[in-house]
Amino acid sequence: MSGRARLALCAAAATLCAAGALLPLVDPLTWMIQAAALLAVVTGVGAAARRAPLAGPLVIGAQALVAVLLLTVFFVPGEAILGVLPGPDAVAGFGRLLHDGLRDAGRYAIPAPVTPGIRLLLIAGVLLIGLLVDALAVTYRSAAPAGLPLLALYSVAAGLSQGGAGWLRFLIAAAGYLLLLLAEGRDRLSQWGRVFGGPGGPDRVRGFAGFGGPSPAPVRTGRRIGALVLGIAVAVPALLPSLGGGLFGAGANGVGPGSGGGTISAVNPLVSLQDSLNQPVDKEVLNYRTTATDSRDMYLRIVALDQFDGTTWKPSERTVTDVPERLPRPPGLSSSVALDHVNTSISTAGWYAQNWLPLPYPASKVEISGRWRFEPQGRTLVGDRGQTTHSLQYQVESLQVRPTSRQLAAAPAPPAKLLREYTKVPGSLPPVVRSTARRVAHGAPNAYAKAVKLQDWFALDGGFTYNTEVRAGSGSEAIARFLRQKEGFCVHFSFSMAAMARTLGIPARVAVGFTPGTKQPDGTTSVGLKDAHAWPELYFQGVGWTRFEPTPSRGSIPDYAYPDASAPADPGDPAPAPSRSAAPSDDGPTTAPSCGPDARRAGSGSACVTLPAQSGAGPSDGGTSPWVIAGIASAALLVLLLPAVPLLWRVRIRAGRLAATAGDGDLVAGTLAAWRELLDTAWDVGILPDESLTPRKAAARIISVGALPPEPAAAARRVATAVEQVLYAPHPQPVPGLAAEVQLVRSGLRSGAPRAVRLRARLAPRSAARLTHAWSACGAALLLRCRTSRPVALTRRTVAALRPGGRQGRQGRQGRQGRQGSEGA
C-alpha cells in the first residue's frame, strides 16, 4: 500500500473516531454503518483520482460529486433524474429533509430517534468532515490543520450530549488524530531516503514503511510526544477543579473533591426541562408501584435549588456523605403533624441516564445498588464516579406529611440561621417583584396566609396562562418580565413565587422533579417526559419544607392550601354572626300578615314598614307597579347579557372587519381590517399581539406558537404580504379572498388549541380588551369635548370610534393620501 493510500485510510479512520462522539445523541446506531460505507466510497474515489493523477482541486471536486450522488441515491431517489442525478426536485427534497432534521433536532430529547431528516444531518455532516480532512491531510499533505474539522465534529457532539461526550470517546477521537499525524509523518519520512539512527547504524525507512520492523528513533520519539500530550490533555482537566470537574465526569456527576466526603457541585438540572415538556411523544421515564392511598402528593423530587444569585436558581455546593441505613428525620418536622408511612418500588427506563435520583419527599430509607451519595440539606441522592439512573430498580420508604392549615398558620418563626440563608435575594432583583408580593399578600396575618395568597394569585386569580413555548430566560429580569406578560410554564411560576416569598420573609427554594404520573391498568404508575415539573417549597417550623403549586393546570394544589373548615373553632375566635334568615322575629310568626294596607314587611321576619303614598288618582290595589316590574326585568336581562357582551362584540367586530375586505371598499382599510382580525384571532387563543413586530415577523410568530398546519400557515403569510404591499408598495394591488384567508387561519388556530382554550376564545375572547380601551378613549373624549361639542356630533364620533375598522380605515386613507401626495410632489 502506498503512503498516500495509507494516509487516506487513516484520515477516514480519524473522521469515524471523531464521529463516534455522536453515538449517544441518537438511537439506533445504524446510521453510523451507512456513514462509514459512504465515507469509504468517497475515500476510495479520492485515492483513485490521486493515482490517475489529477490536480488537487479536481480530486476534491470528484469526491464532492460522488458524495452528492451517494446522498441522492440514499435519501431522494424518487425525486432524482434516473434515481441518481440531483435535479430541482431532488434539491427541493433535500431542503425538506434538512428542514425536518433541524426541527426534529430541536423537538426530541437525547437520545433522539433517527428520523430521515436527522439521518441526513448526521451522514452528510460526517461526509463533509471526512472530505475536509481528506483534502487537508492527503491531497494537500497538511495533517495538523485537519485536526480543526475533527475538533469541530467532536465539539458539536460534546456540546449536545448530556454531561459531555465522555472521556472514552475523547480518547478515541484523540487517538484517531494521533494516528493521522503518525501516518503523515511516516509518509514524509519515506521521501527522505536514508534515516540515520543511533548506535545500531542506519536503518532504511522502507523497513518500517509498511508498519513492520523496528521503529526508528524519530518515530519512537513522535509516539512518546503524542502519548505525553494526550495524557496531559486528559489528566490536567480532571485534576483542576476550576475547569468544572474534568473529562471524567466529576462535574457532570455532581461530585468532586472536598472535605467530609466530597461536595455536591452547582449543576443546573433545568437545562432540558422545557425541551422535555415540548416533546411530541411522551416517552416514559420511570414507573412505580406504591402503597400510598392517594397518589396526588407523590411528587418525585430530583433536586432542590436553594441559591438565587441574580442569574439563575441552582443548588448550593454542599457536603455529601455515604447513604445512611436510615435517612435523618426531616428538619423542622414535629411529632404533632400527621404522617403516613409509604413504601414505593421504582424502575427507571434504560434510556434515562442522569445523576440525580428521583425520590418521593421526604424519603426515610432508600435501598439501591451502585455508587450513590447523600446530600443532607436537600435530602437528595447523587451519583458518584459515573453512576446514573440508567435501568435502575430501587425501593424507597417515605413519609406523606399531612399538616393542617391551622398548624401551618400557627407555625413559629424558623431558626435564625435558616431564615438568613433561605430569604436571601440578589440586590439586582427588580423592585416590581417585591412590590407585587406585598400587594398580593396585603392583609394576610401570617406567613402561611401570605403563601396561600401568592399561590392562588398565580394559579387562579392573577390571569396567568400556562405556555411551554415561552422562552425560559434567566436572571431576575426574567421574573419581572413574567409578572408583566403573565404567560409561562412551571419554571416561571415556581421561580417567581419562591423569589416573592423570600421578599416577604418566608424561607423558600425550588424543587425539580416529576408530577405523580398516570395510573396504569396493572396497578403501576407511569411517569413520562411531560411530567417533568418544578415547584416551590416553603419552610414552616414544625412542618418543614412544604410543597405549594402555583402553576395552573399542572399538578395538584395540596389539601393544606385550602381553609381547614373541619378543624375545631379556636376559643379565642369570635362567634359567627347569625344569618338574616335565622334571626328571630320581634313581631311573632311571619306566616300571619298583620300589617295594614299601607304597610308591608321589609323581609321575612321583619317589622312592618309604611309604604310611600301612590301618586295619581284612584285607589291602590297593593300590587307591584308595572314600571317596577319592567325595571327589575331590564336589570335582570342586563345582568344576564353582560357576560355575553365580549362574545357579541367579538362577533360583530369580526363580521365588520371581514366585510371591509370586499373588493369594492377602501383597499387599505380592508386589508388592515383583515390583518387586525388575524391578530385578534391569535390573541383569543393566547398569542398576545406584539405591535413592535413587522407583519412578516408577527405572522411567523403566530405560525410558530400556534403550531399552524401548512395551509393555514401559508394563508397567514399571504395576509402579512398583503399588509406590507398596501403599506409600502407605490401602487398596491387588491388581494382577493382575504376574508377566506383569515377564516382559514382561525380554523387552524382553533383546531390546534385545547378544548378549554377554544371555549374561552368563543365565550370570553381575550381581544375583547380592545372594547375596554375603546370605551376608555370615548370617555376621555367625552370629558374633553363635552363643553365644545354638540351632543349629536359627539355621538357620531363615539360611534365611529367603536365601529369595526373605523380607526384603521381613517389611518389607511390618511396613509394612502400621504403616499399619493408624495408621489405627486
Image: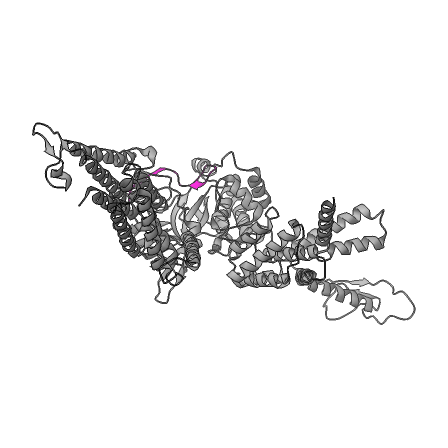
Across and down, in percent, residue 216 comes to 13, 33
**Left or right: 637 in relation to 794:** left
**Residue 738 position (above or below residue 190):** below
**Left or right: 345 in relation to 507:** left
Image quadrant where one finds the C terminus: top right
- Figure coloring: one colour
Q: Which residues are magenta?
A: 307-323
Quarter of the view holding residue 239: top left
For the view shown, which residue lies furthest in the left direction? 200
Q: Relative to the observer, which residue lies in front, 56 or 518?
A: 56
Quarter of the view holding residue 593: bottom right
Could one spot residue 377 in this view of the protein?
Answer: yes
Could one spot residue 287 in this view of the protein?
Answer: no
**Left or right: 559 in relation to 593:** left
**Left or right: 59 in relation to 785:** left
Give the residue displayed 32% in from the left and 34% down from the top: 241
